[in-house]
Image (tube, grey):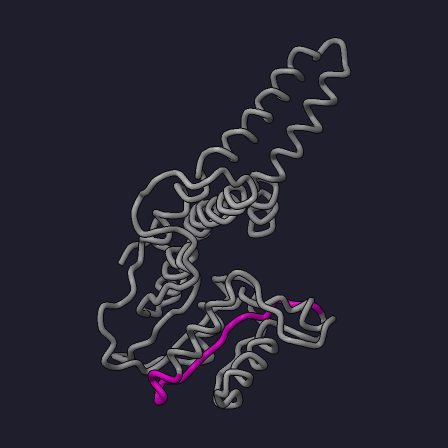
Amino acid sequence: MQTILRAVSILLQPGHLLVLGLVAGWILTILPMTRRAGMCLSGTVVLSFVLITCLPLGDWLLRPLENRFPRPPALDRVDGIVVLGGGQEALVSRDRDRIALNDAGERLIEAGTLARRFPDAQLVFTGGNGPPGLTEADVSRRVFAAMGLDADAVIYESRSSNTWDNAVMLRDLVAPARGEVWLLVTSASHMPRAMGAFRAAGWQLEAYPVDYHTTRRWGVFPMPDFEASLRGLDVALHEYFGLVGYRLLGRTQELFPAP
């Protein structure tokens, strides 16, 4: 089931659908029996390109995800900080022999900032994706060391490959005690699914979202930007499909987890 859901999620990415639509429309157009259907499909794809370029569809879908979990208003005590992988480019890091981060790199930066703010809190990183010989956890160790933190004092989980694995494997590794206050650091758009997974695994954490890509409130239309809108659609639909898939698999008790 997990493999099927992942394949469907990849197939349904807007960019992939547009390419498949163009190819299918071209094939149908060159066949006499299906020429009209091909022209209709091609026209629909062209219209989709125009709508994605002119309308902030990505923002519209991302904003409910990013606004779902606000940051805690006050933090007097923190026992631990959990940061999820996904902000590293492990393949580039290995090939270039240097730290390479992506758009979600704020997860690591904010986690390091929190670790300095709460020096007694246990910093934990979870993420095992990456090429042979270098996982996300390995890259995160380099990042924390470059930030001047004691990288050896961080707990690293380097076998997980998805958010559910993060929750289950880390729970077993850390064994948090009742009453402890732990923060969960991940991208704001990913926070609903991450919180749902950790709750289903029996671990209650405080959400600490980072890596925002939308404003808090609805505003005026931005300048037409196909690339930005398409990227936002990819991220948003990945999370919405992920929420549905996790609910079907019993990895979250709520379809759209809330505070």
Most foreground residue, 229 or 74: 229
Region rendered in magenta: 116-131
The image position of residue 235, as x and y in percent, is: 50, 49
| Residue 212 versus residue 231 in the image, above or below | below
Q: Which residue is rendered at x = 50% and y = 30% of the image? A: 51
Side (left or right) of 17 relative to 222? right
Give residue 145's quadrant in the image.
bottom right
Could you say where residue 41 lies in the image, as x and y percent from the top left?
62, 20
The residue at 70%/12% (across/down) is 35
Q: Quadrant of residue 79?
A: bottom left
Q: Nearer the viewer, residue 13 or 74?
A: 74
133 relative position to 211: left or right: right
How many numbered marks, from 0 up? 0
Instruction: Name the residue: 76% across, 9% down.
Output: 32
What residue do we see at 38% from left, 84% from top? 116
Q: Is residue 123 magenta?
A: yes
> Which x, y percent locates residue 31?
77, 14
Locate residue 61 relative to residue 229 in the image: left or right: left
Vertical comparison of 178 with 25: above or below? below
Indicate yes or no whether the magenta region holds residue 39: no
Task: Locate the C terminus by quadrant.
Answer: bottom left
Q: Position of residue 93 (x, y in %)?
A: 67, 72
Instruction: Identify which residue, 12 or 229, lies in the foreground.
Output: 229
Taking 90 as reference, is 39 above or below it?
A: above
Of the pair 177 and 42, the residue shown nearer to us: 42
